[in-house]
Image (cartoon, rainbow, N blue to C red):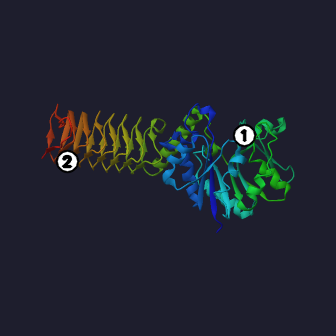
Amino acid sequence: MRPLHIVILAAGKGTRMRSEQSKVLHRLAGRPLIDHVLDAGAAVSPASVTVVVGHQAEAVKAALEKRGCLFALQEPQSGTGHALLQAESALRGAQGDVLLLSGDVPLLRGETVAALVDVHRRAGAAATVLTAEIHDPSGYGRIVRNSSTGQIERIVEHKDATEAERAIREINSGIFVFDLGPLFASLRKIGTSNAQNEYYLPDLVALYRREGLTVETMKLSGADEIRGVNSRSELAALSRDARLRKCEELMAAGVTIEDPATTYIDSTVEVGADTTIHPNVSLEGTTRIGARCDIHSGSRLVNAVVADDVLIRNHTVVTDATIDAKATVGPFAHIRPESSIGAHAHVGNFVELKKTSLGAGAKANHLAYLGDATIGERVNVGAGTITCNYDGEKKHQTVIE
């Protein structure tokens, strides 16, 4: 099997985002945009992953510290062709193919990536382009095909296109697979005679065709998964689609979600079968919900671990805490980090737990603050109870057996 290497373009500032933060670090479904792209690329088990950075380069590197990526710096940013060329040193001596992805295209599916690589290799192509037809192709590069053979001839950017070319609805996704052999020598031949005065990567298509190299395409049936993020409005739209995709995935696995449009579930969340999620619920981070739970409206769970048969009543907040089986929490409860609630325990109205362990079968049903406490099994905590053992220097444990 030929080795496959991935290069992700992540150098741009994203001017229309109106942000000092790198565009690829803006969050969608709880994680940076580029994390979703890396997950899609993982479907093809790459031999290496190189991220081309530029704007906020150090911040991007720090965010990807645990992902095992290589990095290449593009400075200044002079177009996509120039960006890919910066990865040459990271890939020096490598063989096989390069899958080029964009760090701001977060809805791309792993199965699409795998299919594109397969098309490329079956065709023995020098380059393969992922394309799609859309109703309004404004702003996208157009796929210009030979009128007789239907083969791709070139890609023309919207700003450089004639009126006839702008009528073409098949667009370039910006996602390619390249044979490493001729790639970098060919990139050096690309000129800048275009409206942006930049080195356009799509110009490789026409160059390869002139040199008699095979260029292949794979057309998607829909363009939803190749949409990029260029503005806050587009980020909101893609975030909505990502949430709906997650809800569809969970519902297919047996979870009841009463109103997917108002349910916010991060892509990293796990939910067991026969759990019901009511409207206006947020499940974030690494939250894991067991089977047959009932999560009522207005609740927010962040990095929470919830066992089976748990009832979370309205407007409860749980952060970095655990809840054991058949417990009941809320309404209007606040379970803060490093807290745990035992099996069959009850935590009720306006009760706050902070670094507190509440034993199995224990009850704190209303109006209590339990901080830095260990509360044993079957203890009943009455209304108005406060545990607070701060002596001005240290916080001591309260232990109730």
Where residue 214 appears, as percent x and y from the top left, is: 79, 59
Where residue 68 appears, as percent x and y from the top left, is: 52, 56
Task: Give the crowd class for mark 2: few <14, some 14-19, many >=20 residues within 10 Å.
Answer: many
235 sits left or right of 142 in the view:
left
378 sits left or right of 283 in the view:
left
Which one is in front, 284 or 73?
73
- Residue at position x 48%, y 50% in the image: 252
Residue ranking furthest to the bottom = 1
Please indicate, yes or no, whether residue 220 appears anywhere in the rendered image. Answer: no
Sequence-first disc among 2 and 1 = 1
> Which amino acid, by three-letter code, is at mark 2?
Gly
Q: Secondary structure at mark 2?
A: loop
Residue ranking furthest to the right = 148
Where residue 25 appears, as percent x and y from the top left, is: 54, 41
In the picture, which quadrant includes the N terminus? bottom right
Q: Are marks 2 and 1 in contact (CB under 8 Å)?
A: no
Which one is in front, 92 or 281?
92
- Residue at position x 60%, y 40% in the image: 55
Q: Which residue is mark 1?
A: 140
Please indicate, yes or no, whether residue 87 appears anywhere in the rendered image. Answer: yes
Task: Give the crowd class for mark 1: few <14, some 14-19, many >=20 residues within 10 Å.
Answer: many
Number of marks: 2
Residues at marks 2 and 1, CA–CA distance in whole angstroms: 59 Å
Residue ranking furthest to the left = 401
Which one is in front, 288 or 44?
44
| 359 in relation to 6, above or below | above
Q: Which residue is mark 2?
A: 359
> Which amino acid, by three-letter code, is at mark 1?
Tyr
- Residue at position x 23%, y 48% in the image: 342
Q: Secondary structure at mark 1?
A: loop
